[in-house]
Image (cartoon, rainbow, N blue to C red):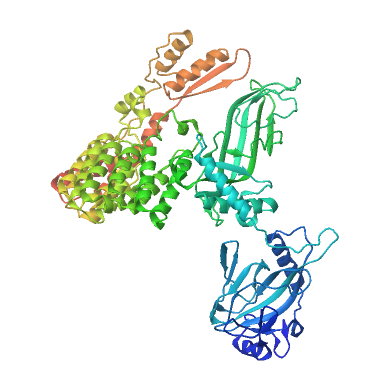
């Protein structure tokens, strides 16, 4: 950009060139009636006429065409021929402004103004526009060298330029011109929707006062939008005008409005003739009227809204909110329309033909502000949590309203696990642990101890999995130590049996600022160690239990060493008796708390943290040593022959033959020449009793032959465990505490290690 008397401008424009621009400029006048006068109390700005400005460069023409196309679309005059003509270059230095005014027609066909602000750092200087009772303020800062900003408005919009407080605002002013055609002779003016807005507001108010009105309405838009491109600012054509009117009408009618994507679909079984079974509103299914078509059986159908955007084009986390009958408008708008997706799967094997079709359409969704919780809870309690968090954090409503909303959510949550409602049917998502944590945080923000207690007791304890721990710790500040101790000890009582890791991980967070009453929680966790069960498949497998007794097998459980470290670190601030009680329970239950993989790897760290004179950890050491000696003080002996221990209840001829093979001390391989069904039966018997043998089919002849071969898998497995237990003994010897009992056990373990070779 070159300016006469100044030269080529740099961007951002430096102060030296600003001063040169002012020297080359004149004080800008303003129009008053038929006069044009200069009065700096009304307008304080410098101007340079277009004859003194030259703009060039390879990219400018294309960039300006892009700006003009966005302006044309934004002003809703895509069907008009629009041009832009440079009018002036303006410089608002510090203190520059222009009071409220409307632009006059400066040339034939002018209908609006385009302001392009050049990169010139400044503060203030915002443009304020008013029309039909609405007012918006637009900041036009452009400080990056590669960026400009622009704003356009109709000439009959009142506007003012607020004072520049710092720096300089430099801008190009263009007149927007409508090029006349034979079919368009009138000058474009800003659309005035006031009548439509008032009428729509009245309709909305009367609609929701009527009996039986639905909680919300979803008005389908004309154009298709992707979820990524869904926003109020990018709506097209009539959708943009409709959204503008309905958004303002909704505000007057005390309603809220959002954009969302409506999903409608069905899936089921059908014999398709190539025809289309279209959408029929709220009907669950129908038969085609075409005699050549066949009826479709609906297995599942859905109507819901997601991908929410508020009027500020911010994404809103409402999740999926179902649509109920009468809410989708205009009524019948999808009748006979082809679906956006349609899929037919042909019949194969025993499976019949299936079909699926679906629509995905953008919609304006409106509901009364006082029905907000009703609507959100249609999508499940998780959908209401973000809104409740916003109420708690920003004070968008009074505390009374926020507390009432919180009470609604807490009460609804208590029903979320009922098997008869929509959660179990899969219609809406069940609330997860992160949702529970967010709900706790919202109630903490609201400082609502009774609701917090009710929520934890009714909703958290029954579904707890540990992810809620941080929020539960934060809740103690609101609940108070005595109340928190009562609630969290109840949680430990109820969930230590199946969520021990989560309960134990909660303790160190509470012990970071130990409160005497929290000892009740610690005591509940320690008592709960007794309720942790052996995995159910081991409890109910009688054969496994028999093998566990005879071979002293050690079941495994997914406890990491951090489990014991967290537990004993958290117990340290409380009574020593709790630590010793925990050690006693853990040491007496090697079936649950495995010495080799849990206890021994933890003891070194525990001694380092608590000292080797700590009685609780000494007891853990002793229990682990005694258990390992019981299992592996003497090396396992290999089986003396090929005899297996098993007895089959089935008395068929094949099982009797298998029983004889199992008990035979010398026979290692046996061949069963039997048909497929009898081979399958033998497979099942061998696998059910976990026999130490392989079974493969030799596919020669008829019937084919099942070859069973005995192996030493149980002994091999036991030898692997033996080696790990010898390694654990070696580790325990290096960690031995200074007690007489430990000294005696160490001698025996050293002898066992030596015997292992």
**Could you tell me residue 464's position as x and y percent?**
35, 40
**Could you tell me residue 434's position as x and y percent?**
42, 46
Please identify the quadrant where the N terminus is shown.
bottom right
Q: Is residue 624 left or right of residue 667?
A: left
Name the residue at 57% across, 65% down: 136
**Could you tell me residue 286's position as x and y percent?**
65, 24
Given residues 61 and 219, the one toward you in this image is 219
Name the residue at 38% across, 22% down: 641
**Could you tell me residue 373's position as x and y percent?**
44, 43
Q: Is residue 712 left or right of residue 214?
A: left
Name the residue at 31% across, 44% down: 451
Q: Is residue 430 visible?
A: yes
Name the residue at 76% across, 77% down: 57
Q: Is residue 1 left or right of residue 536?
A: right
Q: Is residue 246 above or below residue 288?
A: below
Given residues 350 and 54, the one toward you in this image is 54
């Amino acid at each position: 950009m070159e300016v006469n008397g100044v030269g080529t401008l740099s961007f951002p424009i430096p102060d030296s060139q600003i001063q040169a621009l002012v020297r080359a400029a004149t004080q800008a006048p303003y129009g008053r009636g038929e006069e044009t006068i200069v009065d700096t109390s009304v307008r304080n700005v410098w101007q340079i006429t277009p004859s003194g400005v030259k703009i060039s460069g390879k990219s400018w023409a294309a960039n300006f065409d892009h700006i003009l196309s966005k302006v044309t679309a934004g002003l809703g005059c895509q069907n008009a021929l629009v041009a832009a003509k440079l009018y002036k270059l303006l410089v608002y230095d510090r203190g520059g402004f222009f009071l409220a005014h409307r632009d006059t027609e400066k040339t034939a066909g002018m209908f609006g103004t385009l302001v392009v602000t050049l990169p010139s750092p400044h503060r203030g200087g915002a443009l304020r526009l008013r029309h039909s009772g609405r007012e918006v303020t637009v900041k036009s800062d452009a400080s990056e060298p590669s960026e400009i900003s622009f704003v356009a408005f109709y000439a009959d919009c009142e506007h003012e330029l607020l004072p520049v407080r710092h720096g300089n605002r430099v801008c190009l002013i263009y007149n927007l011109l409508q090029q006349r055609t034979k079919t368009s002779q009138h000058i474009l003016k800003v659309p005035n929707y006031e009548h439509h807005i008032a009428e729509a507001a009245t309709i909305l108010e009367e609609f929701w006062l009527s009996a039986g009105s639905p909680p919300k309405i979803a008005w389908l838009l004309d154009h298709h939008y992707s979820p990524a491109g869904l926003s109020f600012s990018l709506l097209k054509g009539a959708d943009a005008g409709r959204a503008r009117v309905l958004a303002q009408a909704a505000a007057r009618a005390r309603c809220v409005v959002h954009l969302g994507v409506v999903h409608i679909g069905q899936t089921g079984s059908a014999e398709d003739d190539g025809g289309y079974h279209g959408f029929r509103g709220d009907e669950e299914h129908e038969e085609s009227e075409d005699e050549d078509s066949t009826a479709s059986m609906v297995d599942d159908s859905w109507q819901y809204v997601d991908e929410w955007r508020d009027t500020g084009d911010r994404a809103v986390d409402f999740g999926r909110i179902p649509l109920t009958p009468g809410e989708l408008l205009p009524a019948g708008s999808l009748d006979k329309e082809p679906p956006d997706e349609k899929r037919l799967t042909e019949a194969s094997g025993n499976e019949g033909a299936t079909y699926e079709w679906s629509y995905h359409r953008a919609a304006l969704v409106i509901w009364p502000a006082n029905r907000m919780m009703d609507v959100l809870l249609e999508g499940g309690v998780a959908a209401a949590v973000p809104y409740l968090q916003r109420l708690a954090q920003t004070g968008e409503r009074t505390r009374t309203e926020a507390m009432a909303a919180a009470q609604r959510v807490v009460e609804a949550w208590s029903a979320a696990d009922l098997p008869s409602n929509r959660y179990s049917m899969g219609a809406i998502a069940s609330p997860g642990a992160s949702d529970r944590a967010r709900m706790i945080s919202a109630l903490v923000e609201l400082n609502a101890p009774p609701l917090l207690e009710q929520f934890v007791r009714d909703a958290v304890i029954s579904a707890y999995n540990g992810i809620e721990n941080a929020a539960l710790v934060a809740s103690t500040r609101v609940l108070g130590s005595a109340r928190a101790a009562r609630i969290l000890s109840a949680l430990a009582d109820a969930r230590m049996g199946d969520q021990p890791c989560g309960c134990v991980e909660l303790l160190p967070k509470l012990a970071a600022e130990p409160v005497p009453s929290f000892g009740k929680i610690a005591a509940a966790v320690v008592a709960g160690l007794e309720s942790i069960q052996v995995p159910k498949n081991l409890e109910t497998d009688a054969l496994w239990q028999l093998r566990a007794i005879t071979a002293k097998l050690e079941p495994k459980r997914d406890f990491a060493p951090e489990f014991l470290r967290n537990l004993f670190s958290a117990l340290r601030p409380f009574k020593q008796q709790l630590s010793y009680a925990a050690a006693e329970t853990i040491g007496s239950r090697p079936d649950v708390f495995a010495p080799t993989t849990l206890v021994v790897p933890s003891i070194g760290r525990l001694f380092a943290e608590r000292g080797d004179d700590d009685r609780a950890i000494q007891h853990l050491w002793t229990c682990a040593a005694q258990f390992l000696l019981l299992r592996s003080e003497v090396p396992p002996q290999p089986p003396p022959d090929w005899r297996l221990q098993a007895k089959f209840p089935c008395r068929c001829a094949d099982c009797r033959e298998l029983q004889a093979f199992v008990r035979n001390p010398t026979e290692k391989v046996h061949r069963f020449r039997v048909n497929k069904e009898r081979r399958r039966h033998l497979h099942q018997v061998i696998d059910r009793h976990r026999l130490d043998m392989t079974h493969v089919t030799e596919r020669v002849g008829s019937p084919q032959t099942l070859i069973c071969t005995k192996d030493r898998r149980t002994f091999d497995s036991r030898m692997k465990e033996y080696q790990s237990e010898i390694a654990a003994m070696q580790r325990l010897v290096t960690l031995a505490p200074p007690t007489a009992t430990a000294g005696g056990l160490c001698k025996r373990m050293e002898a066992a290690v030596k015997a292992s070779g």
